[in-house]
Image: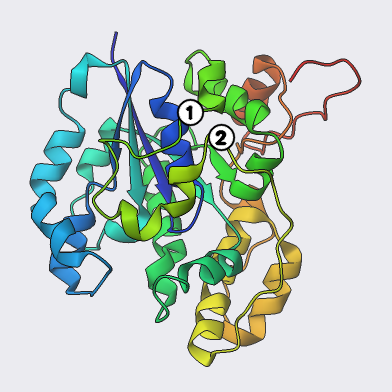
C-alpha cells in the first residue's frame, strides 16, 4: 500500500503544531516539522529567534529536503505528516516534487495571526505570515490534475475538532482514531529546535484548545496595517469573510478580493460531517461541500 505523504500548508501562529501533535499521536504516522526552515533562513538572511541553531540542525539544500520528503517514510509508517510554512517555499524552489504529496491547507484570520506573531517578532510584513504564498501554492497544486485540496479554517476547526478530523480523514481515505484528539504534554523529539521560542502553549497542551472569539486586534502600527490589508484581501478568497474583505479594500486596494471559498476550492472541511456520498457529489459538481448541521442525536 502506498503511504500517505500529507503536506499541511499553513502560515505561522496557526494550530499547525497542535495538528502535528494530533497526527503523531495516531501511532501510524511519522511527522516532520518545517523541513524547509533552514534553507529559508540561509537564503533570506532573516534574523529569526534561534537562527543559528536552526541552520545548524536543519538541511540548507532544498533539493535534499525535497528528495527526503518524497522518499521512504520514517520507520515505515503508513502516513507522513509534513508540517510546512507556506513562506518557506521560496519562489526559486522547484515544485515538481509537490506532485508526490497530498495537500491540505490550514488558514486563520490574518489579523489574529499578526496579533500572535508580533509577540515573538515585532517587525512583520505580509510575506512573513504566508497568506500570499499560500494562495500561490494552492493554485499550483490545483493545476496538477488532482482533486481540489481540503481547506481548513482554524477557527471553525476548534469549534468541533472531532467532526473536523473525521471529515478530513474520510476525505483522505484513512480511518479516524480518537487518539488524534489528545496527547501527552511536553516536548517531542520531532519538534524543531525553535520550539523554545514558539511552542510554549503547545508544550503545555494535551488537546486542541477551546475556540475563543477573537479579541481586539492591535494593529496601530502603519506597517502592520498594510500587512493586514494585504493578507486579509487574499484570505478573503480562502475564507469567504465578507466583512474582512470590505475592511481591507482601502488599505491595500487588492483587486483579488473574492466572494468566498467557491472562488478557490469546491471542497472545504466544515464543523459538521456529512455522508461520503454527499461529499463526493459536491466535489464532482465543482462546488463547495456544505454539509448539513448535525441534528439531535446525529453522530458527529
Q: Is residue 5 above or below residue 65?
A: above
Which residue extends farthest right?
A: 296
User: Residue at the location (65% across, 86% down)?
Assistant: 250
Q: Quadrant of residue 123?
A: bottom left
Say whether marks 2 and 1 touch (CB < 8 Å).
Answer: yes
Q: Which residue is mark 2?
A: 207
**x, y percent for residue 204:** 48, 44
**x, y percent for residue 1:** 29, 8
User: Residue at the location (54% across, 27% down)?
Assistant: 182
User: Residue at the location (60% across, 65% down)?
Assistant: 112
Q: Is residue 220 above or below residue 126?
A: below
Q: Does residue 73 show up?
A: no
User: Residue at the location (39% across, 74% down)?
Assistant: 121
Q: How many marks?
A: 2
Q: Quadrant of residue 284?
A: top right
Q: Quadrant of residue 160?
A: top right
**Crowd rating for badge 1 (residues with CA inside 10 Å; few <14, some 14–19, many 20+):** some
Q: How far apart are the two marked residues, 2 and 1, measured between alpha carbons? A: 6 Å
Secondary element at image label 2: loop
Report the quarter where the C terminus lies. Answer: top right
State the mark number for residue 183. 1
**Crowd rating for badge 2 (residues with CA inside 10 Å; few <14, some 14–19, many 20+):** some
Q: Is residue 122 above or below residue 23?
A: below
Between 108 and 211, the one lying in front of the other is: 211
Left or right of residue 147, residue 49 in this image: left
Amino acid at each position: 500500500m502506498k503511504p500517505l505523504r500529507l503536506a499541511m500548508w499553513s502560515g505561522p501562529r496557526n494550530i499547525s503544531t497542535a495538528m502535528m501533535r494530533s497526527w503523531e499521536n495516531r501511532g501510524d504516522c511519522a511527522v516532520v516539522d518545517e523541513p524547509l526552515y533552514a534553507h529559508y533562513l540561509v537564503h533570506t538572511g532573516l534574523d529569526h529567534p534561534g537562527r543559528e541553531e536552526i541552520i545548524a540542525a536543519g538541511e540548507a539544500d532544498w533539493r535534499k529536503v525535497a528528495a527526503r520528503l518524497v522518499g521512504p517514510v520514517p520507520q515505515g509508517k503508513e502516513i507522513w505528516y509534513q508540517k510546512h510554512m507556506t513562506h518557506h517555499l521560496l519562489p526559486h524552489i522547484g515544485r515538481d516534487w509537490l506532485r508526490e504529496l497530498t495537500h491540505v491547507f490550514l488558514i486563520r484570520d490574518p489579523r489574529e495571526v499578526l496579533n500572535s506573531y508580533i509577540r515573538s517578532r515585532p517587525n512583520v510584513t505580509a510575506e512573513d505570515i504566508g497568506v500570499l504564498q499560500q494562495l500561490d501554492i494552492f493554485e499550483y497544486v490545483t493545476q496538477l490534475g488532482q482533486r481540489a485540496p481540503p481547506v481548513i479554517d482554524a477557527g471553525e476547526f476548534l469549534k468541533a475538532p472531532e467532526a473536523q478530523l473525521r471529515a478530513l480523514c474520510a476525505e483522505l481515505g484513512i480511518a479516524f482514531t480518537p487518539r488524534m484528539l489528545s496527547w501527552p504534554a511536553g516536548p517531542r523529539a520531532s519538534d524543531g529546535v525553535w520550539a523554545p521560542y514558539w511552542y510554549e502553549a503547545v508544550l503545555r497542551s494535551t488537546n486542541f484548545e477551546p475556540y475563543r472569539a477573537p479579541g481586539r486586534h492591535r494593529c496601530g502600527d502603519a506597517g502592520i496595517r498594510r500587512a493586514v490589508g494585504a493578507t486579509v484581501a487574499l484570505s478573503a478568497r480562502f475564507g469567504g469573510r465578507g466583512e474582512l474583505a470590505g475592511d481591507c479594500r482601502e488599505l491595500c486596494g487588492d483587486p483579488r478580493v473574492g466572494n468566498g471559498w467557491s472562488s478557490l476550492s469546491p471542497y472545504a472541511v466544515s464543523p459538521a460531517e456529512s455522508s461520503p456520498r454527499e461529499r463526493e457529489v459536491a466535489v464532482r459538481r465543482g462546488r463547495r461541500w456544505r454539509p448539513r448541521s448535525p441534528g439531535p442525536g446525529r453522530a458527529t
